[in-house]
Image (tube, rainbow, N blue to C red):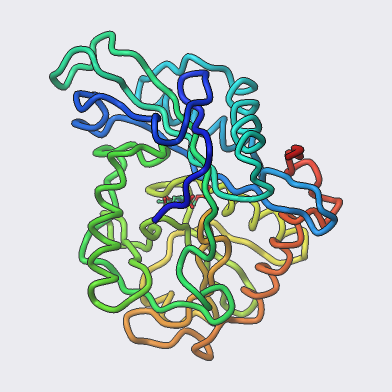
Amino acid sequence: MVQKAEKIWMDGKLVNWDEANVHILTHTLHYGCGVFEGIRAYECTDGRSAVYRLTEHMQRLIDSAHILGMKLPYTCPELVQAVVDTLTVNKMKSGYIRPLAFIGDGVMGVHPGANPIRVAIATWPWGAYLGDGALEKGISIKTSSFTRHHVNAMMTKAKACGNYVNSVLAKTEAVADGYHEALMLDTQGYVSEASGENIFIVKNEVIKTTPLTSILPGITRDSIITLARELGYEVLEQLFTRDELYVADEAFFSGTAAEITPIREVDRRTIGAGKAGPLSLLIQKEYFRIVKGENPDYASWLHEYKV
Ligand code: PPE
């Protein structure tokens, strides 16, 4: 169960958690045309609190809405402030933040008419997304029987609610089969992404990740590319196949919720030594140093706030 906070920001106001409700004829609830974000705030090592890459996440929310033809009634700075206000009123020094923009009730039928575009922001504590020990030991994944979206069937650069039907199908199948997560292939059969993460592989110290075709442009993915290049590693954005993943030295997932989660097994084949790889763990360590304010070179990625 999600742990309740005191307030949820809804359409410009902070309302009580239990009163953040919508009408059953909310358009998005029926047709899936909504957009959301997943953001983390961390308590820094020195006691400050900071939201990680907050402006980039809010800009992606605005871009996602733009792709779906939804006009958000708030500016990026207003949404940034709303996140800070929500964290502050909920006295959260760290936690997960979920902005959601959706089409409210009014007319029914696929055409949303002039129904209001509504925005809500909720916060809750969220630990290791892929379970206890996942970050340290790595996880076991399965290639899904479900294909990731064709780029002209769903808008894959938008973090759209409806896109996640595909994710829910893949994830529930993988979990039912005893795996931590599902890996999805694109419509051509190349590795795409997981239900809620981007993927990286490492071979001979060269890092490779899926190009921005069928995948969500992950902000963690972007952080890792920047960080790994800064650390002197070559990073390629290139399509690769599932068998290239099978013979990789290391593999890991990236995402706000999943952070950097090593992959130790794919389709019952061990990856590398069958445990979290050394480069995956190095990047994970450096990533946690950044989000916790220990690396001044990346201070511009942190949006400090006071609780
Ligand atoms: N791909 C997908 C499909 C995806 O959902 C996410 C985030 C990513 C890649 C990584 O993006 P980024 O967080 O910007 O690095 N998934 C969010 C939702 C997870 C959920 O179960 O809900 C997240 O990590 O917050």
Instruction: Tell me the quarter of the picture where residue 34 sits.
Output: top left
Residue at 15 percent of width and 18 percent of height: 108
Above or below, comparing residue 269 to residue 126 in the picture: below
Image position, residue 180 (x, y; %): 37, 73
Instruction: Tell me the quarter of the picture where residue 115 sits.
Output: top left
The answer to whether residue 38 is left or right of residue 292 is left
Q: Nearer the viewer, residue 306 or 210?
A: 306
> Which residue extends farthest top?
114
The answer to whether residue 208 is left or right of residue 150 is right
The answer to whether residue 193 is left or right of residue 290 is left
- Exactly how many numbered labels are in the figure? 0
Residue at 39 percent of width and 56 percent of height: 1
The answer to whether residue 88 is left or right of residue 120 is right
Above or below, comparing residue 42 to residue 135 in the picture: above
Residue at 71 percent of width and 67 percent of height: 233
Residue at 25 percent of width and 34 percent of height: 32
Above or below, comparing residue 291 to residue 247 in the picture: above
